[in-house]
Structure formats: C-alpha cells, structure tokens
Amino acid sequence: MAKEQDMKSLHHWIFEDESEQITPEQRKKLQNSAPKAPDHFRNLVQEAVQQQMTEAGLGGKQNLTQRTGHPRHNTRTKRRKWSKTLFVVATVLAVGGVAVAAATGSSWLQQRLIEQGVPEEDTVVLLETELSQQNSELTGDVWPGGTPEEKNWSDPLLTVTEAYYDGATLYFLASPSEEAHDYDLSLKDHASVNGTDGIASLEKVDGEAAYFGRIDVMDPEAAEEILQSDEAEVTMTVLAQASYDGRILYTWKDAEAYEEIYGTGAFTLADGVKCYTVTAKDYYVGYTPHELTVQVPLTEAAKQVIGKYREEGKLGEDHAVMITGDDQTSALSATEEASDEESASNEKISDPIDTPISFAADGSHVTCEFSGSDGVLCIDAEIVQNTSQVYIGTLQAEAISEEALKALYPQGTSDNWTYTAGDEGEEGYWQYRDQNIFITADKETAHYQNDECETAETSDPSEEALTELYQQALTSFGMEGQIAENTTMEYGDVKEYTAKILLNGLPLAWYSQWNCVSTAQFENGQLASLNVPGVLIVTDQEEVTLLPIEELMEHVAEYVKEGEIVSVASSQPVTELSLEYYVDLTKQGIVFRPIWNFKVPYIIEESEASIGADNYLYFDAVTGALIRDAYGW
Amino acid sequence: MTKQQFAQLVLDSTDCLYRVSKGILRNDADCEDAVWEAIGIGFASLDTLRQDAYARTWLTRILINECYRILRQKKRSINTVELENCAANPSTDRKYSELYEAIGALDEKYRIPIVLFYLEGYSIREIADILQSTEGTVKSWLSRGRSRLREIMEEV
C-alpha cells in the first residue's frame, strides 16, 4: 500500500504540482521507485574500495560500513579483465565492530550517534542495553478506525534492545518477533515518557530485522525533568498491519481499484503482478496491538555525555531544549525561541535598512544590511562594472560551424571525419576516423571531445599558455570570454577552465535562460574537451541608463522586507556586485538586458532543506526589479 | 579528506553511483567498469580535491566522465545497432516503476539532470558543476525534461 500511495503522490507531483521543486519526502518516494544497486554492483564497489585501501596500506584498519538493504556477500567468481591485482574478498571489509554489529542490528544506534559526531567511547556510555520491558496485548476499541481483528501473538511484537534519552527525545532500536516479520509494525502517534505526552514514530531499518523508534517529548520543561530523573519509562502502543506485498489493496479512497476489482474479480497488471483485494479494514485497523513499556536507566555518566554534546549540537538536532552554562540547564521552547526571533525580526522590518548604505570614496565598494521576514541580507561588496554604456536588445543564435570545430584538431584532415546520424531525438556526431575524437553541434551548444589526449606525451604547460589556447579557440568562433580556472571539479592531470562569454564588453550571466558559458578541459597540455554555446549576434539594441546604486538598494531592501528573497545570503554576505547581461528566452526571441549580479560565496549545503534555495540574486540594472526566471525556481 | 573518509563516502554512495551510471549506460557490466575506474581515479586524485564538501559531487563528476568515455569507446568500436544496447534504456532491461521507466525513456540530455536533481538531490549549482554547464541551462533541461516526462507518462 505504501508503494501504491508513493506512486500516486509522485504522479500528482509530475502532473499537477506546478512547482519545479521536490520535497525530501517526494525524493524518498522517487528513490524507492527506482532500482537500488544490485548485489553484484554493491560487491564490486566494495572490492574497488578495498583494493584502493589495501594499496594505500590501510587494508586491515578500516571500519567501513555499506549502508545497504542487501546481504553482504561476494558473488563475483572471476577476476575483472582489466585488473592486474588479485581482489581481496569483500567480507574483509566487514571486520570492523560496527559493520558486524550493523548486520545484527545491535549497534545501529551507536553508528547513528557516531555519525552525529559523538565519539565511540561516549556512545557506549550513552546507550543503554540493560532494559526492562513489559508487554501486554490490547483488546477492544483501541483505535479510532475500529476494533482490530483479534490475533493471539505468541511473542511480543517488539523487543527493545538498546535505547538512549538525549534530554528531549527517547531513541530506541527494537527487534520484531519472528511472527511480526510478516507484518508492518508502527506506533500509535502518541506515547508517554514518565507520564508526559510524546509524539512517537517507528520506522523499519532498511535491510535489517530491526525497527528504529523515537518519542519526542514536546514539553521542554517536562523533557528536562525526565533528564533529571533516574529512569525514563516509556509506554507506547505497537500496531501490526497487513504487509503490502505488491497487491492492490482495496480502500474507500481508491475508486479506480474498486471498479477494476469489482468489474473483473481480479486482474493482472502489465508487468505480470496479480492483483486482488485485501479488505481495507484489515489494513487500516490491523491486528491486536501491544502496549509496550520500557524502562531506560538514566545514569549520571550518560547525563554528562548528553550535556556535553548537546552544547556542541551533536545531540538533539531538532530539539526544543537548549542548554546554557556549565551545569546549569535552562529550557527554552522552540515556540518561545521563534517568538523571540519573530519579534526581533518585526522590529527590524519596521526599518528595513538596518545599516545605512555606505560607499568607498571611489565608489568601488558598498556596505549595507537589510532585514526581512526571511532573514538578513548583508552586503559588503566590491562593485565590478566594466562599462557604463549598457544596452537592451535582441539576439540571434547561430550554430558554430563544423569546420571551425574540426579545426580544433589541427593534425586532422577533412576527409577523415565521418558523420553518424543520431536516432530520433538524439544528436548525430562527427568522429575522426579510428580515433576517439568527437564533435556535436547545434544552435544552442557545441561539444568537442578528444580522448586521445589521455595517451599523449605528458607536458606541463603554464596556466597562461592554457588560457591563451582557450582564448584562441573562442576567438576562432567569433567569441570573447572571461576565462578562469575552475579548480572545484578538477581531478588528476586534467585542468579545467570556464569562460563567461562577453557581450558589449560585459559578461553574460550564468543564470541566464540561454546557455552563455563555455567550459574546457586540458589534459597533457592539449585541449581534451570544449563546450561552447552557439554564437549570439546582436540584431537590435538601444542604450539605457543604469539605476543609481542607492536607488537599486531601496528596491533590494523592499524585496527583503517583503520576504521575497529566500536567500542563502542570510548566512553569507554578498561580496561582489557585478554588472552583467541577462539573456532571456521570450516570445520576441532571445533578448538581453543589464542586471546586477549580487554574488554570494557558494557553499555546498548538506541539508536537504537547502536544495533548491536561491543561491543567486539578480536585479534589473535599469528598473531594480528582482529577476525571476522563466522556470519557476 | 583522508582515504578512509573517501572510502566511506564511496560505500555510502553505492546506490547513487549505480543510478547515475545506469542513467547513461545500459549494461550493468558497463556501469561496473565505469564505477571501478571512477573509484580508482578518485583515490588516485584525492590530493587534488580542493574541498571535502565537494567530494560527492566530484566523485559523481568523475563517474559521469567515465560513463561517457565508455560510451564513446563503444561508438568507436561497434556498429550503431550494438550501440543502441549500450545506452541506458531501462524499459527493456528489467522491470522498474512506471515513473522510473519513463525517466529512462527521456533523451539523455534531460535524463541525467533529472536523475541528479530529483533522484539524487544535487543542487542546480552542483549539477552545473558536474555537467560542465550553467545553472540556467540545467534549469532549462529540468523544466523541459519534466514536461517530456509528463508526455511520456500520458502516452503510457
């Protein structure tokens, strides 16, 4: 049922959700609908890693785990054809205590804590495995959906094997009984810890015969009281429901399945899955639940560990409780915190420009700060403006000629190039006879790839020489570019460069709706690959007057105040204001206009919540309007 | 980043490595070749990784380069009919969800960004870095890719 609902949700997202973004939940569903790495692939990755570690002299020391839903065993029976090294059997990888323990599930919580940055020795103090537990089966009308079907379980549905309380949430790992393997287990959403209400959740540990549970104590004062006590006693209701095994479950929400089933009795999907019905009652109401009570001792040593790591943010990542001082603890609810922030923010909103705009004497630097409901925008930026003569206008794109691209391989002769047409919707390509040199080109982009550089005689040219080589290539296409080395993605002997194409002396903005950037890779001193946009030719343009920076900033302040800028700039100041041209695709064709690019240092955010957040700020340099792109991002 | 940390990152990224390579190459054996080479290059070049935070993006970039290198080698060595069997096309390989198969039916230039953004959670900026393109272009691919995905799903 879960999978069916996941697919419905994804269908809704594809067909009806106007947003281009995807939530973490939707991503998880999408990942669940896609294949996981098969065992042979997983084993190969382990082998490859093991070989590298062995060669580095780290073969026997690593404590690496592969988080997987698959058993760890080596199914490969033969040596890979391109490897000269005997493979070390993959199981060597699992010698670490954590890896072995992960297979049995007994130290899964420990691994989780280590991932949060808690040292292993402290996780041992924190985790309690000496737990006492009582179970009782619940009968009668214990669920709003009705009375569960009676089922006599031979053993308790869950046995809690390890647990810890971090001052706000009680976490536990539990093993299902043999019988429970055939059912989906969950928790009633409310549970109690020392008599205080908490929000409960339970999830199956991927690939393990174990469940991970958490009870969040919502009242921070009560959460703190629990921490001061000798024991946390948690009482929760464990529910068992029919496992979804690929069948379509008839529910009152699923009219289509209802009609299909009652029209045909049973039916077979295109992929051969036989579908029939399980009553909704069985699924939603489930079978006799268990009330499970667990006593978790709270030792002084554990409390010290909790105190230490909560301060460092390694525990209680999403908790309401904050600790201040050495031994003193104070509780501050998330609501209070938010309220404080809100009031502070409101105070700032009344005066959106928090610090006055100031300029360097020569006008090359600007400093100011604006506040709004989504945070603070700090600007401490150099102003980079190559020219004050700016235009708006229209452009025409032209493909780079094949001849010009072929000329990038100077050793070549024209009759050695052969063309292979692409399948429908796919690009065709030119290849230099018997060599790995390829060219594809259309109006939007052209690509030159020369894999022969890989085996070319090694040389170590200067950066200036490579930049010159790159500039020459662009010049041969009638382009000029602002070239810079891009070290972020470089690896091995490959040198990588990017070039912002210039128009009327100003760079074209990266976030333009038309591809305006070129990239090049050099290997052994030769041009290994080149991506270049089609040539843009100005067909019409008129000069415009730039908005003074002070007036531009008033527009910016207003956008910040209105909360229309969801900005990573909250944590990073804008360090450069660069005058560029934005190239847009409109009904009138390809148009360009001057914009101010508010550059914020780019930092890769690990948090899923940050995915898709704005990481650029463009303002129209004539009107001061925030640039919103055509794709709704 | 230490080799130990990189090794753990590789192992943690196994599913991602599979899905990304499968987005370009059809045969599991080719995917294995690509990932094997990518891991080797990653370890050998680890000292050239400038910032630890880029490690996952960097590894994915290496893998994609290796996938395309294999694809180009196939172009050189075999005829077009065989080539069709090298490119990703999950619909005739093994049965996955309707949606995943629709993603597999997308043109390659839309498929890879869709996989990286929606499935693997890379940001637009990271995808631009990986695919040597611009954020604007990546967004355009994603937008067109999703429109095409709708069409494919409707056809089904």
Image: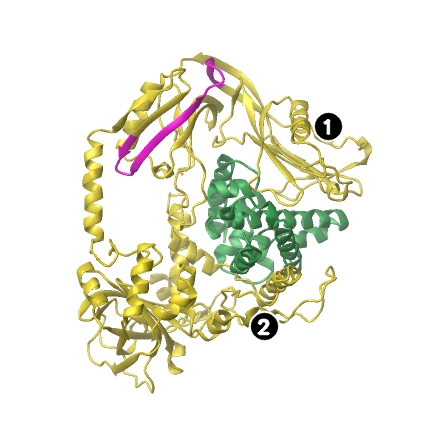
Give neighbour class at mark 1: few <14, some 14-19, many 20+ (Cα, 10 Å).
Answer: few
- Amino acid type at mark 2: His
The residue shown at (51%, 15%) is A540
The residue shown at (52%, 52%) is B102
**Left or right of B27 on screen, residue A167:** left
Q: Is residue A151 above or below residue A562?
A: below
> What secondary structure prevails in the magenta region?
strand
Can residue A144 be seen here? The reply is no
Give the color of chain A as drawn. Answer: yellow
Give the color of chain B as drawn. Answer: green
Give neighbour class at mark 2: few <14, some 14-19, many 20+ (Cα, 10 Å).
Answer: few
Q: Which mark is residue A90?
A: none
Q: Quadrant of the C terminus of chain A?
A: top left
Residue range (magenta): A370-393
SS category of the residue bearing label 2: loop
The first of marks 1 and 2 along the sequence is: 2
**Left or right of A420 on screen, residue B134:** left
Q: Which mark is residue A403?
A: 1
The residue under label 2 is A73
**Front-lying residue, A359 or B87:** A359
List x then y, in percent, for residue A194: 19, 71
Chain letter belonging to callout 2: A
List x then y, in percent, for residue A182: 40, 78
The residue shown at (70%, 51%) is B83
Q: Nearer the viewer, mark 1 or mark 2?
A: 2
- Amino acid type at mark 1: Glu
Q: Is residue A441 above or below residue B106?
A: above
